[in-house]
Amino acid sequence: MPMFTTATGWVLETARSGYALGFNQAGLLTHRYWGPRLPHPDDYPSPPNPPGWASFNNPAQLTPEEFPGVEDLKFTEPCLKLSFADGVRNVVLRFDAAAVSEGETPELQLTMRDTVYPLLATLHYRVHTAYDLIERWVTLTNEGDTPITLERVFSAQWHLPPGDDYRLTHVTGRWLDEMHLRHERLDLGCKVLESRRLTTSHHHNPWFALDRGQANEDEGEVWFGALAWSGNWKIAAEVTDFNSTRVSIGLNDWDFAWQLKPGESFSTPACVAGYSRAGFGGASRLLHDYVRNVVLPHGQQPHKVLYNSWEATTFDVNTSGQIALAEVAAAMGVELFVLDDGWFHGRNNDTAALGDWWPDAVKFPDGLTPLIARVNALGMEFGLWVEPEMVNANSDLYRAHPDWVLHYPTRPRTEARNQLILNLARPDVQDHLIEKLDRLLRENNIAFIKWDMNRNVSEAGWPAAPGEQRELWVRYVEGVYRVWGTLRQRHPRVVWQSCSGGGGRADLGILRFADQIWVSDNTEPNARLGIQEGFSYIFPANTMEAWVTDMGADYLPLSFRFHVSMCGALGVGGHLLRWSESQRAEAAHWIARYKAIRPLVQQGDLYRLRSPQTHAFSAVQYMAKDKSAGVLFAFRTHLPLPSQLPPLCPRGLDPEARYEIEGVEGVRSGAGWMYGGISVELGDFDSTMRMVRRV
C-alpha cells in the first residue's frame, strides 16, 4: 500500500522512496521525511517541534512547514500570501480534515481552514508509485461573501533532509542557445529562477535537481522536480541560518494578483517531484517514463520521420514547389511532410497576415487539397505550421479586432518580429481560434500541427478585463490550454508539436496536449549535442524533434548530422532539391537505420555516457526496457593532437546476460562490457552508431 495514516500523520510511499508529513504540537503541518523507502510506517520520523532562537526567531521560523503562509514570526519564503477584504494580509491555516482515495494513483487531500476568515485550502498529494514521483498542487476556496486577493500561491514547498551542503542543478540559455546545465552550490539565502515572459522561456526551465555535491550520472542521491505550467513560473531555493534547505515552486508572483470571489476556487498547476539513489541518470529515467506513460497524449505511439520545408523555401511556397520536395522526401523514406510558414492568406514575409488562417489563393488556388492528396499518394502524412497566438498589424484579423491584442490604451504597442500577441485570456479570442483551426483540420487531412510562438510579452494589459488585470498571466495560459484541449478532443489523432522560437515553451504542462517539442531553432549539430543533453535531463527522446539540416554541411559529414538527430525524433529540414543523388541515398540509408532503432530511442532507457557540454568526445546510449538490445552513439568534435579517446562503458545491460556490440569482436557478459568498456576510434567531427544485442 503506497499510503499510510499513522498516529503522527501520513506516509506516502513509492516503489523506492518514502515521503512523510504530519501535524506537530503547535498544529502546523510539517515535513517529516523524504528519501529512501523505509521498512515500516513507524520508521519515519515524528513531526518536528523545534525550539525558538531568542525573540528574533520563534519556533515557527524553524519549522519545516509543508505549505507555509505569511503568519507569525516567519521570515522564510512563504507559499501563500493574500489580502482579505478588510485589509488583513496574513493567513493562519489549521487542520480541518483528511481524505485518502485509493486506486492506481492514490491521493491524499488535506483540508486546512483559516482560523478567522472563510478560506479553505486543500493540499493535494498524488502518488505515482512506479515512477517514484509525488504530485502536489493546492486548491483555495473562498467560502465567504467578500473577495480575497491572492498575491502568491505556490504549488509546493519541498524540504530536503537537514543540511546546508546542497548543490542545485538547473538549465539556462537563450534563443539558439538553450539548455545549458548549471551545477552550483546553494549558499545561505535564496536562489531564484523564474520566467516573466508569459511562456516557459528559453532562459530557464521550471525544473530543478538537488544533491549533496557528490552525485554523478550513475550514483548518488538526487531530489528533483518539475512544474507542469507553460507561463510565468518561479523557483525559490532557500538555505536558512538553521541548517535547512527547501525549494518552493509555482506560479510567479511577479505582477500577479487573483481576485478570489465568493464561492470560487483557484487551483495551482501541479508539481511532480521525486527521489533517486541512481544519480542524475536515474532521476531522468523516472521523469522520462512518467512523461511517456502518464503525461503525453500519444505516449507509446512512434513518431514518424518528418520533413519540414521551411529552410528550403521559407515564405516562397506553392503547390508545385512543395510537391517537388515531397517527392524527394518520400523516396528517402520520410513518413510525414510538413508545410511551414508562408501558406496562408497574404503571407509573403513576416510583416503581414498572421491571424488570417486560410490558404493563400495565389499560392494555393485550389486550397491545400491537391498538395495533401499528392503527399498522401506518396505514402506520407501531411503536417502544417501555425502561429495562432500572434497577429500582424497588417492582417484582416487585426483590422477587424485591434482590441484583441495585449496592450495598454495609453502606450505604443511594441512589435517583435513585426507581430503582436492576441489576448488568449479573452474567451472570444479563444472561440475565434478554435473555430478557425477546427475548420482547417476538418476540411483538410492534416495529421500533424507545429504550433509556434515567436515573441515574448510586452504591454501585458487587458483594458476590458472583467476584474483584476493581473489575472492575465494565468488566464492567458489557461486560454491556450483550452484552445489546445478543445482541438485535441475534436481531432484526437492529430499529433501536435510545441514550438516557441525553439525551446521557449518546453514543460510538462504543454506536454498534456503536445507530443513533441521543437527544442531549438539552432540545428547546427555540434551545438545540438549540448542542447539535446540538457533537454534529456527533463524530457524523453520521443518528445525531442531533431532535424538534419544544411547547417554544418560544409564541415560535417552527413552521417554525423544524422547521428545527432537520430538521438531524438528524427526529422529532415535541408533543401532536398540541392542534395546530390549520393546524399539522398545516404539519407535514405540513415532513415532506414533509424526506423529499425526507433523503438529503442523513443521508448527505451537513456544513459548519458559522456557529456558533450564538458567533453569534445561524448556518447549517449539507449536500451530496451527488457535489456535485450540497445544502440550507442559516440561523437567527436575537435580535440587537438595528440589525443587518445577514453573507453566507453555501456550502461543498462543485464550483468549476467551475454551481449555483442557492433564493431567490437567477441561476446561478453553485460558486466564485462559495462566495467571493461569498449574502445572507439574517431577523428575530428566524426561519429559512430553501434548496436548492442543480447545473444
Image: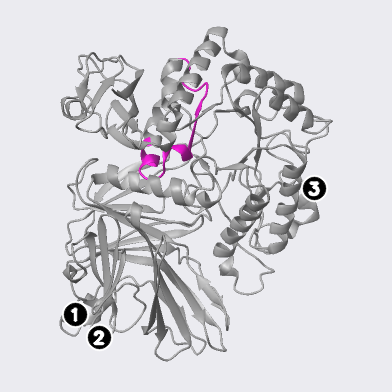
Q: Circle 2 sits on which residue?
A: 26
Q: In the picture shown, does residue 212 fall above or below 657?
A: below
Labels 2, 3: front one: 2
Q: Circle 1 sits on which residue?
A: 49
Q: Circle 3 sits on which residue?
A: 396
The first of marks 1 and 3 along the sequence is 1
Q: Quadrant of the N terminus?
A: bottom left
Q: Are marks 2 and 1 in contact (CB under 8 Å)?
A: yes
Residue 164 x %, y %: 18, 61
Q: Residues within 10 Å of mark 3 (few under 14, many from 20)?
A: some
Return the residue nearer the eye: 36 or 247: 36
Residue 469 in the figure: left or right of residue 608: right
Tell me the distance, in whole angstroms, between the alpha carbons under discs 2 and 3.
Answer: 63 Å
Tell me where residue 90 sits by quadrant: bottom left
Label 2 secondary element: loop
Residue 177 x %, y %: 43, 37
Residue at position x 25%, y 72% in the image: 64
Residue 336 x %, y %: 61, 29
Q: In the picture shown, does residue 269 fall above or below 669?
A: below
Which span of residues is magenta-colored? Answer: 533-554
Residue 423 x %, y %: 65, 58
Residue 320 magenta = no
